[in-house]
Amino acid sequence: MSPSEANSWQHIQSEVLERIRSRQWKPGELIPNETDLAKEFGCARATVNRALRAVADAGWIDRRRKAGTRVATFPERKAVLSIPVIRKEIEAKGQDYSHDLLHSVTRLPPAEVSRRLNLADGIKALELHTLHLADNKPHAYEERWINVDFLPEAAKADFTTISANEWLVTNAPFTEGELVFSAANAAAKEAKLLNIETGTAIFTASRTTSHDGNGITAVRLMFTPGYQLHMAI
């Protein structure tokens, strides 16, 4: 291992995890501070900070300002979820993907959408309704709002040739978000679009993403029966 590899944040992360898993640092125990760890590994304190943030994000340590960092008493395993590109999901199954843009208008959003996107009073957003298809059969119906005040290039995008889902994954990196899964009974509108009976149980996902506090998009996706969500843990 080269000197640069030995004091990289990834190496420090691995070493910290090994000490926790081997019980060298026991659950609930206070671990050395960043300054001491930086001295031990021969690196900058910022490098240690980045490594510890990664370990904390994985649920192995609890970091508290002025109280130090402790090994988590009950470490949590956290699921890793990336926003899927629906086209790629469908094509991975050997099916042909297409989408229909059913509705596109820039207008004042409902109060709940403004709250989710952190919009000031009077700020408009782009409303899109899209039907995603696999082999020309309904796969998912999407109702989406995009904050074009923060992301003005979205107002110029041609969402008839590329779905808003794929465009945003490619062009709008986010720093935080909220995701809610639920089961619902399809209302008449969704049932007609998804070609199912009204009242059929469907899987829904509501998601909001933002970048440093600026809302990017709020979307609700409704999938045809049989859809499966995959996450890594």
Image (cartoon, rainbow, N blue to C red):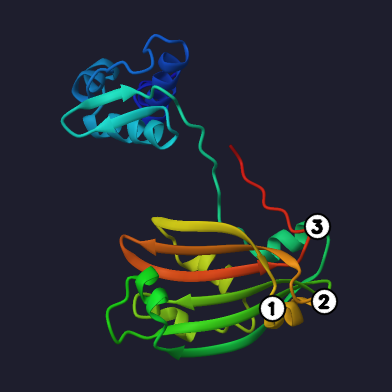
Tell me which corner region of the image, top left, top right, bottom left or bottom right, holds residue 18.
top left
| Quadrant assignment, res 31 | top left
Q: Pointer 2 and pointer 3: residues touching (CB < 8 Å)?
A: no
Q: Is residue 170 above or below residue 43?
A: below
Indicate the secondary structure of the residue bearing disc 3.
loop
**Residue pushed farthest left?**
66
Q: Position of residue 115 (x, y in %)?
A: 35, 72
The answer for how far apart the CA atoms under marks 2 and 3 are is: 14 Å
**Quarter containing the N terminus:** top left
Q: Nearer the viewer, mark 3 or mark 1?
A: 1
* Tag 1: amino acid: Glu
Q: Is residue 80 visible?
A: yes
Q: CA distance from mark 3 to mark 1?
A: 24 Å
Q: Secondary structure at mark 2?
A: loop
Q: Nearer the viewer, mark 2 or mark 1?
A: 1
Give the number of the disc on residue 190. 1
Image point 55% across, 82% down: which residue? Answer: 128
Q: Give the residue displayed 26% in from the left and 20% down from the top.
A: 37
Q: Is residue 198 above or below residue 228?
A: below
Q: Residues within 10 Å of mark 3 (few under 14, many from 20)?
A: few
How many numbered tags mark residues here? Answer: 3
- The residue that label 2 is drawn on is 136
Measuring 39% from the left and 22% from the top, which residue is drawn there? 73
Quick one: 113 or 129, which is closer to the camera? 113
Residue drawn at x 31%, y 15% is 29
Residue type, numbered disc 2:
Asn
Q: Which of 99/26 is in front? A: 26
Number of other residues with Cα within 10 Å of mark 2, as a class: few under 14, some 14 to 19, many 20 or more: few
Q: Which numbered marker is on residue 30?
A: none
Q: Secondary structure at mark 1?
A: helix
The three-letter amino acid code for the residue at tag 3 is Lys
Query: Where does label 3 land, which residue?
Result: 93
